[in-house]
């Protein structure tokens, strides 16, 4: 039997970077733009933008934030540079193995990324490792709905959607994974029966 979510050989988006950017623009027009603005605008300091894609958050980032754009797809980062959307260094890497020292970042930004990573648990651990004490993950994502019938539909459609897109999962319980790996969710907005979420999460600090 074919695996419903086969491993990807490549992260390169088969539709091409322009089509990818247009798709993101369409999602922005449908309402994501306001959430992007609210999410990106509050971030300061040295920021890791995980899965930065075509750079759709760039207009909303504060001028004095130092933003390191990370994505496995070199073509997307090149596109960002060509469009003048890069705000600092661009690094080709995956969230599961971040090439940064411990506590390197004041904040992380991840919009529509944790739906796409191969191993959410490893990414959560890497974010926890590279955020400084008090650092916050600012994120937007789509996840399994809080409404059972909708979640069942998502589960049914997930394998086809995964193949049609560049590895996007619509059936994930992303926040549960983050919490299990030591994050505390400090803010959460929900839309469309909890399918779209905007949240802030910080590694829990342990007291001896
Ligand atoms: C749906 S796009 C979102 C792009 C951008 N964050 C935005 O909001 O427009 C998902 C992005 O995650 C990237 N990605 C996929 N797997 C990843 C991984 N394991 N680690 C980091 N980024 C990944 C993809 O290359 C793509 O740029």
Image (spheres, rainbow, N blue to C red):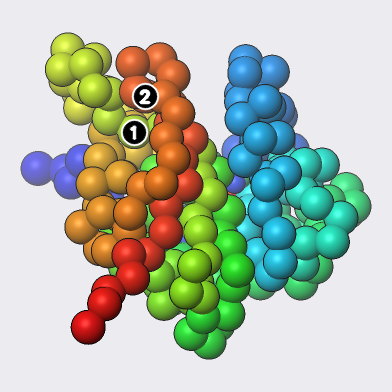
- In the picture, the disc for residue 185 is none
Residue 148, position as x, y percentages in the image:
15, 17
140 to the left or right of 20: left
Point 71% across, 59% down: residue? 44
176 to the left or right of 53: left
Q: Look at the image and tell me in which quarter the C terminus lies.
A: bottom left
**Label 1 CA crowd tier, 10 Å (few <14, some 14–19, many 20+):** many
Q: Which residue is mark 2?
A: 195
In-front residue for pair 206/9? 206
C-alpha gap between disc 2 and disc 1: 5 Å
Q: Look at the image and tell me in which quarter the N terminus lies.
A: top left
Regarding mark 2 in the picture, which secondary structure is present there? loop
Regarding mark 1 in the picture, which secondary structure is present there? loop
Point 33% across, 59% down: residue? 183
199 to the left or right of 34: left
> Do the residues bearing badges 2 and 1 touch, measured as CB atoms within 8 Å?
yes
Asked if 90 appears above or below 62 in the picture, the reply is below
Point 32% across, 65% down: residue? 204
Residue 114, position as x, y percentages in the image:
42, 49
Q: Which mark is first along the chain, 1 or 2? A: 1
Q: Is mark 2 within 8 Å of ligand 1?
A: no
Looking at this rendering, what residue extends furthest in the bottom direction? 101
- In the picture, the disc for residue 143 is 1
Q: Quadrant of residue 2?
A: top left
Q: Quadrant of residue 90?
A: bottom right
Asked if 164 appears above or below 69 in the picture, the reply is above
């Amino acid at each position: 039997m074919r695996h419903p979510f086969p491993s990807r050989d490549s992260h390169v988006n088969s539709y091409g970077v322009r089509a990818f950017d247009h798709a993101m623009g369409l999602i922005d027009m449908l309402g994501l733009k306001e959430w992007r603005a609210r999410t990106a605008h509050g971030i300061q300091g040295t920021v890791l933008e995980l899965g930065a894609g075509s750079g759709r958050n760039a207009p909303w980032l504060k001028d004095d934030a130092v933003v390191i754009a990370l994505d496995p797809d070199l073509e997307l980062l090149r596109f960002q540079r060509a469009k003048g959307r890069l705000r600092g260094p661009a690094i080709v890497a995956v969230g599961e193995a971040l090439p940064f020292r411990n506590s390197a970042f004041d904040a992380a930004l991840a919009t529509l990324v944790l739906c796409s990573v191969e191993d959410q648990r490893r990414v959560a651990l890497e974010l926890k490792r590279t955020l400084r004490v008090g650092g916050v993950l600012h994120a937007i994502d789509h996840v399994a709905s809080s409404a059972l019938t909708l979640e069942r539909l998502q589960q049914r459609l997930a394998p086809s959607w995964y193949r049609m897109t560049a590895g996007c999962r619509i059936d994930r319980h992303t926040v549960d994974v983050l919490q299990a790996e030591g994050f505390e969710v400090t803010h959460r907005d929900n839309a469309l029966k909890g399918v779209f979420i905007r949240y802030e999460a910080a590694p829990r600090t342990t007291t001896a």
